[in-house]
Image (spheres, grey):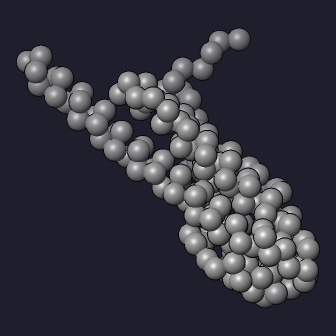
Amino acid sequence: MKRIDTWQARVVVTVIFLLFIALVLPYVSSLTSEVTGVTESPDTSFFYQSEKIFDMAETYGESGRDFYILIRWTFDVVWPIVYGSFLYVMIRWIQTSLRLNRLTLLPIAGVVFDFIENICATLIFWAYPIRLEWIAKIIPYITMIKWIAIGISFVALIVGIILIKFGKKNAKEQSN
């Protein structure tokens, strides 16, 4: 079997990522709002107080909590793999082009913390009205770390692309 080239991998993950953003995310968001009657979710907040997740669990109601758990273990298993693959492949290209090390740890950290967040939120929503206070205390920090890792990944991607393009432009100017 022939190994996929770097540019082919970048095209494939970018197309899948963009399709998810354009089609899947709006559909899942709309469906979630329709089923739960709520637009707020622990995993879309940057940071929240631990009491907030219990408020969300209450507001969702039993059927909303069941749906939330289902979405965490269907869609929200695939979505981190999609955005993580996109960021990993693109940052790997930047890392190689700019001779940097360990940048690919950023999207990996984002995906790992996303999965940890899903486990914690699932446990809280599953156990409610029993309050798993210790999980509620740590989940806001897990969510925040996830978003920081993802945010820095996108910043690294944008800055890296600019540096690569700027570097190629300078190299062409110097050779003339």
Q: Is residue 16 left or right of residue 175?
A: right
**Residue that lies at the very extreme toward the front in this rendered image:** 134
Q: Specify the quadrant that holds the C terminus.
A: top left
Q: Residue at x 54, y 20 (%)?
A: 5
Q: Quadrant of the N terminus?
A: top right
Please state the horizontal and vertical placement of residue 64, each as a whole percent of the image.
Answer: 84, 79
| Image location (x, y in percent) of residue 34 | 76, 80
Residue under the image location 16 percent in, 23 percent down: 172
Q: Nearer the viewer, residue 95 or 173?
A: 95
Q: Is 1 above or below relative to 157?
A: above
Picture coordinates of residue 14, whole percent (x, y): 54, 42
Work out whether residue 131 or residue 60 is closer to the camera in this orientation and state it: 131
Q: Is residue 112 left or right of residue 15?
A: right
Q: Residue at x 69, y 82 (%)?
A: 52
Which residue occupies the foreground of this view, 174 or 41? 41
Splitting the image into 4 quarters, where does residue 60 fall?
Answer: bottom right
Identify whether 173 is placed above or below 142. Answer: above
Q: Quadrant of residue 145?
A: bottom right
In the picture, residue 38 is in which quadrant? bottom right
Q: Is residue 86 visible?
A: no
- Is residue 166 depicted above or below 31 in this figure? above
Q: Is residue 127 left or right of residue 169?
A: right
Apparent side of residue 67 relative to residue 79 in the rendered image (left or right): right
> Residue visible at 46% across and 51% down?
152
